[in-house]
Image: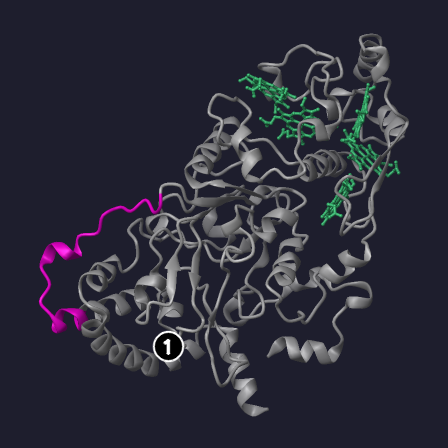
Amino acid sequence: MSGISRRKFLTCTLVGAGATALSLKTDAFASAKLEGYPDSMGVLVDLGRCVGCRSCEAACNREQNLPAPAQSFEDQSIFDQTFHNGQKRRTDENAYTVVNRYEPEGTENPVYRKVQCNHCNEPACLTSCFVNAYTKTSEGAVIYNPNICVGCRNCMIACPFNVPAYSYSSATNPIIKKCIFCYDTRLKNGQPPACVEICPQQVMTFGHRKELIEIAHERIKTHPDRYIDHLYGEDEVGGTSWMYLAPAPFEEIGFDTTMNNEPIISNVKDFLGTVPMVLAIWPALFTGFHLLATRKHDIEHHGDDHQKHKDEEKKS
Amino acid sequence: MRIKMIVPVIVATFVLVAGFTSLPAEAAPPAQVRIDQLSKDFEPVLFDHANHIEMVGDCGECHHHTTGTAAKDPDCMRCHNSGSSGERVACRDCHAAEPFSADHLKTTTEDRKRYHRDLLGLKAAYHRSCMGCHEAGGGPTGCLDCHLRTESGDALFRAGKHTPTPTEKAAGHH
């Protein structure tokens, strides 16, 4: 099952569950283009500047007090690692950001791509969360409350970028883990996240999202030879706080370019927003459990190394 | 001398002379510069200015149009087609050590009256200048070529004596 059909499936099931709980008027399904908070901050990632030094991964690890990695951050052999179906490294509970290397045809140098939460204007993780553990802050960060999270993993399925990771290491309290834009320690005090600050090449520019959009288009205009004429994240899935400029076609460097410009499951958001939680939570929860039970088999085939961890854990 | 000849020697010598004559006396270029303002995870950099002037020739390759010669980048020449020996020459005079502080953003990205809103921070001004030219001209580009890591840098990168041990490795996987 591809990511898209997976999400569609979720959307339909959730909306279905909602519709049975109470009959919705059809206009509740009309999704408007949402701009997010007007003054929200963002990060412009200029992939053409990245030299693959992995400083951002190291800085994230230090800032978020994550466990020691398997290999030193100066180890470049990690770029050769792939999982099932040639899939590159993904973010997980021990690494909220990873850098992958691509060799698109026709480009002289490899292109590196940093992956982390894109902090959507209309986060699918937030809309899919039955217990309301997620918050989109006015600064632009998508954060979550680990004390509320029940570990149901709906956000993992809903996220169009495969970002939230499940923490298998805590059997007693498994929760979701992901990049939070360094909200607690930096963003809320007006400081840029740790990865942005450490980068020797200023691959990442921190600022107000609306100004970053102007700057990005200015860069494309002054150097049309250096950039693909597209700012990824300006419109995708309703816009994201983290946006990308690339020196090679996005689809060749690991981006999903089939993404719709409408927020994902915005229908569900409308629905969740208009009915009290009690009404919503039961049908939705049952659907969620059913979904997870039937999804397990597919996850195993999805080239997802999280599942591998889990299997390993069971053995030990 | 193997500066891959990006800057043709003739132009270089010509501009060198021109550059020097138009220079105010007080701005005589230092032979060595110890670049240390940012040092934390890496040691300071001992920059051989004299050697670079000799190899590169043109001050404008690094100092824009601010040391008396015109900007070299054709894009910049659209507006800065003649040199001016500005008050400010050191990179840190214009490229801020903390480019994303709330105060600094007010004078860059947020200042719509300004042309140069998209201004690099100091760390990136160095690296993009040094590494940009080195990539093309054969200078060093490895992360430990210009500065060694400090103790805190080794801890950051989990390198040196902080390299993960096999037991930690297993822990990291769970």
A267 horizontally vs A301: left or right? left
Between A13 and A193, the residue placed more toward the observer is A193
Does residue A24 lie above or below A38 as drawn? below
The answer to if A29 sits in the magenta stretch is yes
**Residue B39 position within the rendered picture, expressed as x and y whole percent measured from the top left:** 78, 45
Residue B121 visible in the snapshot: yes
A261 relative to A6, above or below: above
Quadrant holding the N terminus of chain A? bottom left
Can residue A275 be found in the magenta stretch? Answer: no
Q: Is residue B145 left or right of residue A45?
A: right
In this rendering, would A263 be left or right of A85? left
Tell me the kind of residue under disc 1: Cys
Q: Would you say A134 lies left or right of A103 here?
A: left
For residue A160, above or below residue A239: below
> Residue tagged by mark 1?
A152
Residue occupying image coordinates x 77% and y 23%: B7
- Whether residue A74 is visible: no
User: Which stretch is magenta?
Assistant: A16-37
Task: Report crowding for label 1: few under 14, some 14 to 19, many 20 or more residues within 10 A (C-alpha).
Answer: some
Q: How many numbered circles are shown?
A: 1
User: Which chain letter matches label 1?
Assistant: A
Is disc 1 placed on a helix, strand or loop?
A: loop
Residue B17 appears at what percent x and percent y? 85, 11
